Amino acid sequence: MNQPVYDEPSDVDAVDGVVLVSGPGGVVASFTPDAAADTSDRLLQAAAQAEGQTIEMRSKSGH
């Protein structure tokens, strides 16, 4: 992976019917409410998957 990995959560606000996301490294995005909800579901699913991968890697390395 060539992209930076951040350990800070993004800020999220609702303004005039749009969900605004701003995060570390200058990440900025605007979503409709439906797209924001779908993105939220996908983020939660990917976060759980990544956590499982992290646990698996630790167990394989003996930590």
Image: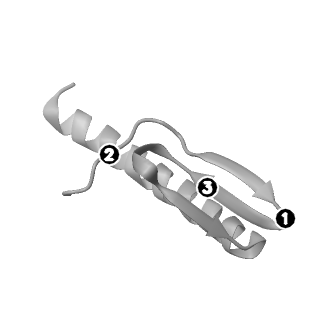
Q: Nearer the viewer, residue 29 or 49?
A: 29
Given the current orientation, which residue lies at the most extreme left position? 61
Instruction: Find out whether the residues at labels 3 and 1 contact each other: C-beta distance under 8 Å.
Output: no
Q: Nearer the viewer, residue 61 or 44?
A: 44
Q: Amino acid at mark 3?
A: Val
32 vs 10: above or below: below
63 vs 23: above or below: above
Q: Which image quarter: residue 6?
A: top left
Figure coloring: one colour
Q: Which image quarter: residue 1?
A: bottom left
Q: Residue at x 61, y 55 (%)?
A: 21
Who comes first in sequence, dot 2 or dot 1? 2
Q: Residue at x 68, y 66 (%)?
A: 36
Q: Amino acid at mark 2?
A: Val
Q: Classify 10 Å Cα crowding around label 3: few (below 14), some (14-19), many (20 and above).
A: some
Q: Which residue is mark 1?
A: 16
Is residue 53 rendered to the left or right of residue 23?
Answer: left
SS label for mark 3: strand
Spatial CA span between label 3 and label 2: 17 Å
* Residue 40 percent across, percent down from the top left: 63, 60
Q: Which residue is mark 3?
A: 21
Q: Residue at x 49, y 50 (%)?
A: 48
Is residue 38 rendered to the left or right of residue 61?
Answer: right
Spatial CA span between label 3 and label 1: 14 Å
Q: Which residue is mark 2?
A: 5
Q: Which image quarter: residue 11?
A: top right
Q: Residue at x 47, y 55 (%)?
A: 27
Q: Amino acid at mark 1?
A: Asp
Spatial CA span between label 2 and label 1: 30 Å
Q: Nearer the viewer, residue 20 or 51?
A: 20
Who comes first in sequence, dot 3 or dot 2? 2
